Image (spheres, rainbow, N blue to C red):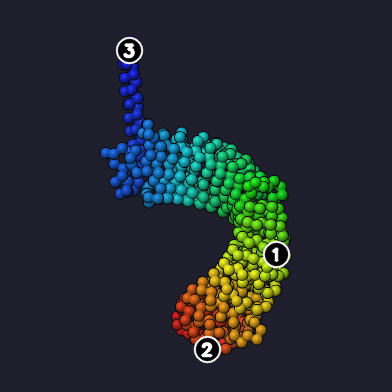
Amino acid sequence: MEKHISLLILVFLVKFSISIAASNETDQKALLAFQNLISPSRFLAINWTKNTSYCSWFGVTCSPKRQRVVALALPNLQLQGTISPCLANLSFLRVLNIGNNSFHGGIPYGLGHLPRLRVIDIQNNQLNGSIPTSLFQHRRVQVISLAFNKLHGEMWKGPWYVPELRVLDLTNNSLTGVIPPSVGNATNMINFSLFGNRVNGNIPKEIGNLSQLADLSLSDNQLTGSIPAILFNISSLLAIHLRNNSLSSPLLLDEGNIVSNREPEVLYIGRHAISGTIPASLGNISTLQNLDCSHSRIVGQVPQELGKLSNLRLLNFEHNYNLIGQIQEAIFNISSLETIAFNSNNLSGRIPSTTGLHLPNLKGLYLGDNHFEGEIPLFIINASKLEILGLAQNFLTGAIPTNLGNLCELRSLLLYHNQLTNEPRDHELRFFNSLADCRMLRYLQVGYNLLNGVLPNSIGNFSSTIQNIEIGDTHINGLIPTNIGNISGLMALGLVGNNLIGSIPSDVGGLK
């Protein structure tokens, strides 16, 4: 009896060994077939050789017991070729990462049938064709990253069944079709990006079922209809990107129950995405850091409730054209603000100018092409990090401050087309003396104002970084300073429409 049992065990072990050998041979053949479709790669030729175990090959990870391939990771190696369908024979494969290479052709359909696959990352290649529908029927896949390829056709056909999917990144392809309601089945989704495709149709309300969603990026598509208010019921949602679509309805936050424990930090919904008025309830999203509703069809006034957004860094409502009224002073009390952009609207009144306003982090102030009046606000001089000051094409009056040189980071000063003057009784335009201290300044445009006086010699002290000086159509007079020729980087100098005497030196920077 013992002999029979020993014989059975021996037979089993032999069969098991043969099975393992056959399986190992299958994995090796699949890897070699993958290698054969890659343009001659010296790197793989050195590392992938038949006289060594494939489990020791670069980029290959095997399970310790069975010695089966569980991961193939070859990113950032400049590999070229097509992806072999034989990879679908790696039945134990969990991770496939061949991103940031130059693979072309299609995605093998069989990859969607690998039963243990968790991660498929083929981003930043040159793949074309459609996405295999098998990927959206995979029960265990957690990450699908196919961004920055040339994929086209409909994203998927039929219902989704990807219950464990956490990341879907299809950014920058040419995919068409609609977002199916079955997207709501992927309840574990954290990041969902279709940015930069040609997806159309409505945003399905079933997205509201994605209770763990943190980042939703649907910008640069052809979506229509309204923004589902239910999006704002997703307590985990930190970033919403909907810019540059054909969405047409107002932003109806009041229909959603904005959750207070985790609210959006980023809201990019401009570029023709919305219409209507700015909802005052935006001021209740206390965690909001970036708010961009630019290039849309927003009308009405700027609600003072926006001043409650104490964590705001970016506030962008530029190019709405029918935004009217004044900017509330409360907005200029948000000390975290880095960018305020309301240019190209129909705003009027005075820009808040009290010295008590404090914007220590402000880098960009864009208020051009409106109907603002009054003087340049005093708080600007204390905004020590300011890089761009855009107040052009308004009705501003008063003198250009002579202490703008305090703004050591200033790169662009755009004050043209106003009614600004220099200090009374100033024979010279003394604000130039101060601006010569702005060693980062590139663009100085103060033309089409009511300046009166002569250009000081300090203009020749401007840094070599300055590329454009526009002082045309003012009332300046006197001699053109000859030391303008000291500005080595100058590419454009506008002095027409004045009463200046002399000529521009022939050796001025890029004007030679």
Q: Residue furthest left?
A: 51
Residue pointed to by mark 3:
2
Mark 3 or 1 closer to N-term? 3
Along the line of sight, the residue nearer the viewer: 425 or 136:
425
Q: Residue at x 58, y 44 (%)?
A: 213
Of badges 2 and 1, the one in the foreground is 1
- Residue 476 lies in quadrant: bottom right
The number of discs equals: 3
Residue 348 image point, x, y percent: 71, 68
In the rendered image of this protein, does residue 165 appear above or below residue 298? above
> How far apart, in angstroms, are the residues tagged by discs 3 and 1?
94 Å
Residue pointed to by mark 1:
329
Along the line of sight, the residue nearer the viewer: 95 or 226:
95
Q: Residue at x 45, y 50 (%)?
A: 124
> How far apart, in angstroms, are the residues tagged by discs 3 and 2?
117 Å
Residue pointed to by mark 2:
502
Label 1 amino acid? Glu
Residue 302 image point, x, y percent: 70, 61
Residue 25 seen: yes
Residue 223 image point, x, y percent: 61, 50
Label 2 amino acid? Gly
In the rendered image of this protein, does residue 5 appear above or below residue 205? above
Which element carries disc 2, helix, strand or loop? Answer: loop
Q: Residue at x 71, y 47 (%)?
A: 255
Label 3 amino acid? Glu
Q: Residue furthest front?
A: 356
Mark 2 or 1 closer to N-term? 1
- Residue 314 lies in quadrant: bottom right
In the rendered image of this protein, does residue 364 appear above or below residue 155? below
Which element carries disc 1, helix, strand or loop? Answer: helix
Which quadrant is the N terminus positioned in? top left
